[in-house]
Structures are given as C-alpha cells and as structure tokens.
Image (cartoon, rainbow, N blue to C red):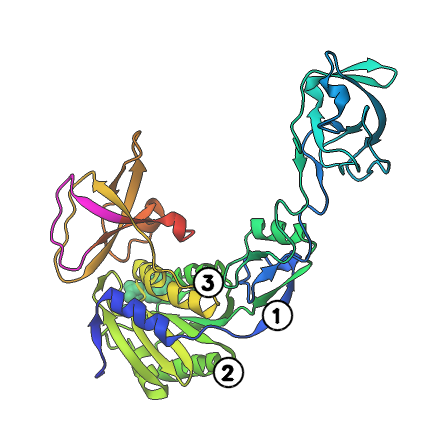
Amino acid sequence: MDVPTFLDLADAQKRLIEEVTATSAIIDVPLEAALGCVVASDVAAPIDIPHFDNSAMDGYALLHDDPALATERPQLAVIGESFAGHPYSGIVSPGQCVRIFTGARIPEGASAVVMQEDTTLLGDRQVRFDARPSAQHHIRHRGSDVRLGQRLFARGIRLTPAHLGLVASAGITSVSCYEHPRIGLFTNGDEIVMPGKPLGPGDIYDSNHHFLAAALRALPIEVVDLGHVRDDVRALENAIQTGLRDCDAILSSGGVSVGEADLVGDVLARLGEVAFWKVAMKPGKPLLFGHLGNTPFFGLPGNPVSTVVTFLQLVRPAFEKMCGLNPTSPWSIKATLRSAIDKSPGRLDFQRGIMSFDQDGSVTVESTGDQSSAILSSVVQANCLIVLPREQGNLLEGAGVRVQPYAQFGL
Ligand code: AMP
Ligand code: MG
C-alpha cells in the first residue's frame, strides 16, 4: 500500500480527529434516559432556584430590627408555623415571630431567622432569644442558586448524575441531546472463537470484541455488532458493506499487519481508500485508518494489548468528537520510576504500569513486567500507562516519566 506510514502518535491523533465529523442528529431525551448523553444546546433555567426565600435553619423567623429584641431578655410571641411545603400565610409584625423549619418559606414581614439552638421556649407561645440576628441571617434567597435565564450548562457536556439533579431542580423534564453515533464493530481472524463455543486446535477466544464493545458502550455510542469475520476477502467485504448501510463509522480488530492472512487493508483499499497505515507506537504499530465514502474506518491490530492501547490513544478521542463532545487526548501526570525499564528508541511506548501515591502525594510507578502485546492480564494488573517518548532509550530507577492514570479511561 502506497500511503503515509509510521506517523508520529500526535500527528495520527490529530488527523483522526480532523477526519471524523461530529454527529448533528438531535433528539429530546427524557431525564430518565439522559444519563451519559451529550447536550446539544445550552440549557437555561426557566425559573429562579430556589423559587422563594426560605429558611436555612430550624428556628424562628422574625424582624431582625424588631425593637423588642433590643431589650435585656428579649421575648417574642409565636404567632404561627411555617413548615416546608406548608407556608405561614400571615404577616410577621414587631413583637412577633413564626416557628420555621429548614426549607420553609419565609413569612411576609420577616427579615431573619434565629436558629432554634439560640432560643428558649418559655411556654404559652413565648420564646426568649439569646442571640440577635443580622439582616437576612439564615435566609436562602430566591435565585441564590441559579437565576431565571442563567445557563445551567453548555452544549457539548456529557450528562452526569449531578447534571440530571440540577436540571430536575429547574423543573426541566427533558434535554436536547445528540443522537448516539452508530459504530459497527467486527473482529477478524480464522483462529478467533466467541466465548461459549468450543476451542479447536489453534483457536483462541475473542477478547477484543468484548473489550471494544464495552469500551464503546462506555461512550454515548450505539454499537452495531458486525460479528466475527474469517480471514476471507468476500467475508470481509460483506461485513464492511453491512456496516456501511447502517453505521457512522466502522471499527475492526485484527488482520492489519503484514502477514498473508492480514487482508483488511487490501479490502479497505479496494472498497474505499486508506488514509494512513502504521503509527510509531508500541504496542499498536499496524493501526490502519481510511474512509469508505463518508464513513471512517478504523482497523486496530489484533494483539489484545495493541487493541486496548490504540483504542484509548487514537480511536476514543475521534469517537468523542463524533459524539458531539470536545475530543480529549489522554492526560498524564509526572511520576518517578521505582525500577529500571528497558526501551529501545524509535517508537513511542505505552508500558503497563502500577503507580502509587506516597505519603507526601508524590507518585511512583513500576512496570507490570512482561510487556508483550499479547499479555492482556498486564492491562488488568496495571492502573496506568507509562508513556515513554519515541526517542527514549533505557531508563534507570529514579528516572522521571509521565503516566496516564486509568481513572480517565474507566478501565
Ligand atoms: P492479527 O492482528 O490478526 O495479525 O493478530 C495478531 C494477534 O492477535 C494474533 O496472535 C491473533 O491471534 C490475536 N488476535 C487477533 N484478534 C483477536 C481477538 N479478537 N481476540 C484475541 N486475540 C486476537
Ligand atoms: Mg489475524
């Protein structure tokens, strides 16, 4: 294939983000179904929150400047009660107070609340006040959380439980969101068998399908299962044609290397066009990217760790953009190596690492050991990826490195 090859990871990341388009289909999603959806237009509050002045304490609502409070042992008459949901409808005048509870409406006339702990109930509806309130003390004002018309959040954010709580507090029942892009997924290889089926000699179970399907579902993406495809040109063409009818992008694993059974690149070149092949990274070098008409195609290498790393570094940011999110390249923090690491210059290396926080908050990290791209257990053992720059050689214990914590990936 005569295409750009051995790209720098950063260039490949940038290109993938440039070459996919953000979804534009918008639907109104009820709050019950909106968790994880991407907001398609800014959401403004249709009411003040809170909607009325209310008490922050259990206590008594009164006039902060009531002359009766200026006396030696100030006492006021309790003229009624304001419960949350059951406001007091009268007016508070000098010499009077209203028993009030947290969240209850402040009665007309009152300008402060004295908390219960600073009072003594004297019987026959008289209360003594041991503290003098300042104006508006313990009153939560109308609109003090959010004002009518104020933006609750901007388009392009992904709805979390906290966002849903906030929109609900404004009385909103549904949010305008981007429709989930549909991503077609297939795995490729004659030796690959779905878990649940018996293994023939030379067969292995399909781990990449389950990893990728789950990793896609962790995004606002609808997975279209294109199944498992044999190392056969017709079978690959069929899977891709099916995906083209129904999907916004196609993602595959396996069959992108240089072996005789690696047919995905040739099929892509025949049905569409290859944009680039191979990235200067380890694991994951044979990553393939191209287009079939307007549909982007991502061919990941089959080695399970290569699949994981290329998905996280390259595919995920591009899919974030397709979902309407602002694409984010993985972030990293500084760490010190607890033991030496072997690395040969030439490719940017992602080693599986175990990081820990010391008492003083500093971070140290060590490799999980064998870094073969077939050792999927290393991905589970690790809690971060150690990022070693392209031209970096061996590193000694104590050397400074950067690590990408798993927390950002949901691994
Ligand atoms: P390939 O990219 O097709 O050359 O495959 C590279 C290695 O990854 C081979 O050892 C394959 O058996 C293995 N492999 C390919 N696809 C999968 C898969 N879906 N699940 C687990 N291992 C795979
Ligand atoms: Mg193969």
**Region in magenta:** 389-402
| Residue topped by disc 2 | 245
Q: Is residue 145 above or below residue 6?
A: above
Please state which of the two labelled residues, at mark 1 or mark 3, is closer to the viewer: 1
| Residue topped by disc 1 | 27
SS class, disc 2: helix
Asked if residue 367 can be seen in this view, the reply is no
Tell me where residue 291 sits by quadrant: bottom left
| 103 left or right of 261 in image | right
Packing grade of label 2 (10 A; few <14, some 14-19, many >=20) is few
Q: Amino acid at mark 3?
A: Leu
| Disc 2 to disc 3, C-alpha distance | 19 Å
Residue at horizontal 88%, vertical 16%? 124
Q: Earlier in the sequence, mark 2 or mark 3?
A: 3
Given residues 101 and 144, the one toward you in this image is 144
Tell me where residue 201 sits by quadrant: bottom left
Q: Amino acid at mark 1?
A: Ile
Residue at horizontal 33%, vertical 53%? 331
Any magenta on residue 194? no
Q: Position of residue 259 (x, y in %)?
A: 23, 74
| Numbered circle sitting on residue 216 | 3
